[in-house]
Image (spheres, grey):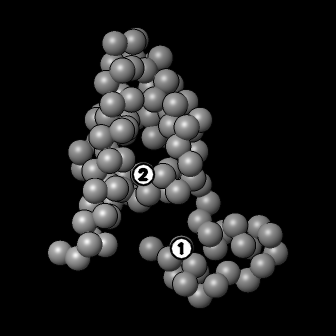
């Protein structure tokens, strides 16, 4: 495994661990408050790149995420892709960004 692959794996593991720590905190609250709390925390404190990777992981099965995180994901803001951002600005997306948006 290359150094880059190690980094990707560790970043994904860190996102799962962080999301699950947030969920662990909110498990002591009533269900609806816990779901809302997880979503609010991630929306407030996770930058778009983190949330984009979070949704990529969920979209590919979401292995390892606490059930409260998965339920809260419906309330978490899904960031736009770089290609979508270019289009919103009236720019032509780069071929690499357009290809990445198709995944």
Q: Quadrant of residue 17?
A: top left
Left or right side of 67 for 93: right
> Which residue has dot 2 on it?
54
Q: Which mark is residue 30?
A: none
- Give the residue at x 50% y 37%: 42
In the image, farthest residue toward the bottom: 95
Q: Is residue 87 above or below residue 25?
A: below
Neighbour class for label 1 at 10 Å: few (<14), some, many (≥20)? some
Front position in the image: 91 or 8: 8
Q: Nearer the viewer, mark 2 or mark 1?
A: 2
Residue 10 percent across, percent down from the top left: 28, 56
Left or right side of 72 for 8: left
At mark 2, the secondary structure is helix
Residue 33 percent across, percent down from the top left: 47, 17
Q: Is residue 73 visible?
A: yes
- Give the residue at x 23% y 45%: 64
Q: Is residue 61 visible?
A: no
- Give the residue at x 42% y 51%: 54
Neighbour class for label 2 at 10 Å: few (<14), some, many (≥20)? many
In the image, farthest residue toward the left: 1
Q: Is residue 19 above or below residue 78?
A: above
Front position in the image: 11 or 88: 11
> Which residue has dot 1 on it?
101
Residue 93 percent across, percent down from the top left: 67, 81
Quarter placement of the N terminus: bottom left
Residue 31 percent across, percent down from the top left: 39, 17
Could you tell which of marks 2 and 1 lies nearer the N-terminus? Answer: 2
Q: CA distance from mark 2 to mark 1?
A: 15 Å
């Amino acid at each position: 495994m290359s150094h880059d692959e190690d980094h990707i794996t560790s970043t994904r593991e860190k996102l799962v661990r962080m999301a699950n720590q947030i969920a662990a905190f909110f498990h002591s609250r009533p269900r609806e408050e816990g779901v809302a709390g997880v979503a609010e925390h991630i929306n407030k404190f996770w930058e778009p790149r983190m949330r984009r990777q979070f949704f990529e992981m969920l979209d590919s099965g979401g292995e390892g995420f606490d059930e409260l995180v998965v339920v809260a994901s419906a309330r978490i803001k899904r960031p736009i892709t770089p290609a979508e951002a270019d289009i919103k600005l009236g720019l032509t997306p780069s071929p690499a960004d357009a290809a990445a948006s198709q995944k």
